[in-house]
Image (tube, rainbow, N blue to C red):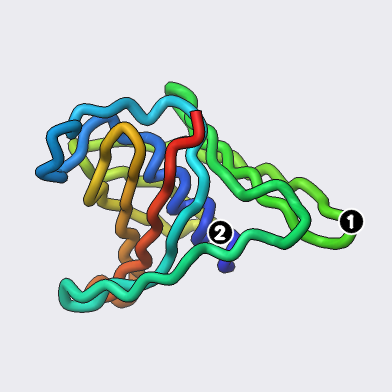
Amino acid sequence: MKKIIYLVIAFISLTVITSCSKDDDNEASLTGKWEYLKEGVANGGQEVLTDYEHQIGCTKDYSLISATSISDYSYSGNPCEEEITTLNYTRNGNNISFNIQGLTFTAVIKTLTATTLKIYISDPENPEISEVTVFKRIN
């Protein structure tokens, strides 16, 4: 399930063209490649984030966006094996919606600049708590 959450986060984060951020670069494009940087939770506006842990010795996990979908590339195991998961999405403003195993998830873009992307994904069963992921652009 954690893999699905990461894919959802990646999917949402890379599909938004604009952000609700107050940064000067709030019209940054998401087309391209984004590496996982931080992860955590937000509850009542308070974020608790830690560095994203990539598998040691493997290629770093990242997401790649196209015009209509997001592909999540993750690496694990010994030897390292690549796993690719792709989702389609719909967008309404800064909200991105997608379905996984019959559940609808909505993510909100909190920050989008030329180099940084932060998204919140609410738990459909507990919307006050959000999973937070921060990405760094790598191309």
Report whether 20 appears left or right of 12: left
Query: Which amino acid type is marked by label 1?
Result: Pro
Name the residue nearer the viewer: 66 or 50. Answer: 50
Report whether 101 appears left or right of 22: right
Query: Label 1 neighbourhood size at 10 Å, few (<14), some (14-19), many (20+)?
Result: few
Picture quadrant of residue 129: bottom left
Residue 79 image label: 1
- Cα gap from disc 2 to disc 1, whole angstroms: 22 Å
Residue 130 image label: none
On the image, the x and y values in percent for residue 79 come to 89, 56
Name the residue nearer the viewer: 83 or 87. Answer: 83
On the image, the x and y values in percent for residue 38 come to 43, 61
On the image, the x and y values in percent for residue 125 come to 34, 75
Q: Secondary structure at mark 1?
A: loop
As displayed, is residue 96 above or below residue 50? Answer: above
On the image, the x and y values in percent for residue 56 come to 73, 61
Query: Which amino acid type is marked by label 2?
Result: Ile
Ranked by sequence position, the earlier of labels 2 and 1 is: 2
Residue 4 image label: 2
Is label 2 or label 1 in front?
1
Query: Label 2 neighbourhood size at 10 Å, few (<14), some (14-19), many (20+)?
Result: few
